[in-house]
Each structure stands twice: as structure tokens, then as C-alpha cells.
Amino acid sequence: MLAPDGRPRRPRRTKLVRRASYVHEATEDLVAELVADQFPHWAGLPIRVLSERGTDNVNFRLGDDLAVRMPRIGYAGRHVRKELRWLPVLAPHLPHPLPDPVAAGRPALGYPWPWYVYRWLQGTTAPGFVLPHSDRLARSLGRWVRALHSIDPRGGPAADAQNGHRGSRLSNRDAFVRWAIDTRPAPADKQGLLEAWRASLVTPAWKAAPVWIHGDLAPGNVVLEDDDLAGVIDFGCLGVGDPAVDLMVAWNLPEPQRGLFREEVGVDEETWRRGRGAAFFQWIAAYDPGEPDREATRVIGRILVDHRRQRSDG
């Protein structure tokens, strides 16, 4: 952290400081101190953690109407500035609400990254990463994705290292996927997994102009209410790239809901096949043979069924 004159800023509480590359777990007490220090009009509002540990961030409820997003690792701190810049631009064009930033917090009290306060989104995320088998949800998700991909992408951040290459060529994932298949006992035969992956990999790359992408449209980032879409959160992987990456959520849906989602998105066969590859990467990366995830097993199984059906059709 730098002071306004460019010199290193001395942390006010050195015992809390960690290097930005390390995980830093914000606590309710720390968030209360930061809010009171930087936004005293919210001091005294009750604070409670919403998730004990996310991969990149921890979110806290602040009173009844607000929430606080605290990065827990360095690259997520860089995502905060991107979200603050672009979420207000995207929100008016989408059919369901996004996190609405109302205040930007700065590093302080030994906490090393920017953070922000946003308006509370009504609804819940899917327990256990399992989306409800709802026709309404499938169609709402498809319409939301189509709307996002239709927003003018000029000036948006490219799909590259800034968002973990989400929305870039699938070939960038090839070495990892082959390693994962080779080294992790997976819920299917290795040859079948390799064939399914190759079928997506050889699909022609996206050649049209890049579009806005969420980049991490997984069940944990879908807000639900009455088995329908209420909002979408976590835009750390936001970028401009291949729309196929936002189709990966389709394989969290069974048939016929997956077909309804595809109908609403309106993508061609090549984009759909690349989307299946994006889902394959997402869930083979998440698969832990020591503690198998039921949803990862389920999604990989659906991908294999789709691949075999497509091969038999032709």
C-alpha cells in the first residue's frame, strides 16, 4: 500500500498484515472496524458473515439493506475495481439485478485490498450447487445470458489473464484438462473423458466479435427466489470474449430444462459444443477424488451422455 506521496504506507495494525499473494480472512470484527472508520454513518449496523469461506471473496450482511464484499486473495482485490467500474454500466441492460455498489472501501487497518459495499440482493443461492429443476429458471437464465451477450462490449476488459482466461480459446485449457484426466480417478473411464474433451476442443473457435461474458456462471453465483432467477452475483471473471463460457451452467440443468435454456440463449451448434467444453473444464477442475462432489459427478455424466448422443447422431 502506498501513501498519497508515493511512499509505502505503514499499516496501522501490523499484526493483521499479510502479503497480497496470501489468503487474508476478513472477520466480522475487522469489517465492523473498517465500516466504522470509512463510513461512520453505517457504524453500529449489525454485521454477520454470509459464507465462512469463498474461493476469492467473503461476503457479509450489513444491516438489513446492505452487504460487504471482502476479497480474500490478491487477484480478487484487483477484481473489485473492475466490478465497481462495469456493474453500473451493465445493470440497466439486464432483466435481473446485479450487485449494486454504493461505496468503495480502501485498504486500511492492516487489510491489504480494496473492498466495497453493495445493496442487498433478495433471494438465496442454490444449496449444494444443485439448481432446482425449474422450467422458469432455465428460461430466465437463458434470457439473462442472451441479454448480457447483447450489450455493447466496447471498452470492456479482454478475456485474458485478468479474468483467468475465461472466454478465451479452449485450447488454453488443454494441458490442464489432460493432466486432470490422467492423474485423478474420475467418475468415468479416462478414454471416454478424453473423447468428450477432444470433441469440444476441435470445434472451431469463436470468430465473431467478442461479447460481454460473466465468466463464472455457476450455481453458486445464481440468486434464486421461488425456483426462478432473482439475480446474478460474483463478477470477478467478467470480461469480453467467447460467449460459450457462459453456457457452462446449462449442464447443471437436467433435460428438458437444458434444452429450454439453449432455446432462450439461441446459440449455434459450435458455440454450444464449446460451452460443453467450458463446463467440462470447470467440473473436472473441481472434481476431488478424495471427496467426490456429487454435482461434479452429475455434470460430468451429463456431458458424457451429450457427447455420446451427438456421436451416435452423426
Image (cartoon, rainbow, N blue to C red):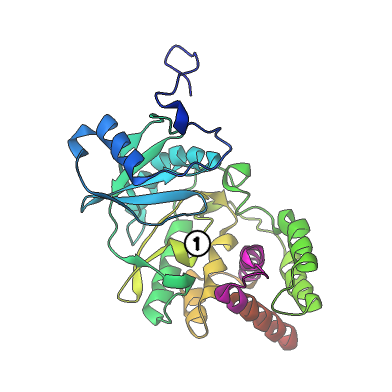
In the image, residue 73 lies at what x, y percent? 53, 42
**Is residue 149 within the magenta segment?**
no
Secondary structure of the residue carrying numbered label 1 = loop
User: Which residue reaches farthest bottom?
Assistant: 312
The relative height of residue 308 versus residue 147 in the rendered view (above or below) is: below
In the image, residue 304 lies at what x, y percent? 68, 80
Say which amino acid is labelled 1. Answer: Leu
The relative height of residue 118 versus residue 225 in the rendered view (above or below) is: above
| Nearer the observer, 206 or 175 | 175
The magenta region covers 270-298
Q: Is residue 255 visible?
A: yes
The relative height of residue 57 versus residue 116 in the rendered view (above or below) is: below
Q: Main secondary structure of the magenta part?
A: helix
The relative height of residue 152 versus residue 197 in the rendered view (above or below) is: above
Q: Residue at x 55, y 67 (%)?
A: 247
Q: Is residue 155 visible?
A: no
Give the residue pinned by disc 1. Answer: 217
- Looking at the rendered structure, the number of numbered marks drawn on it comes to 1
Q: Residue at x 48, y 31 (%)?
A: 17
**Is residue 288 within the magenta segment?**
yes
Pointer 1: residues within 10 angstroms few (<14), some, or many (20+)?
many
User: Which residue reaches farthest top?
Assistant: 5
Q: Is residue 176 left or right of residue 299?
A: right
In the image, residue 220 lies at what x, y percent? 45, 64
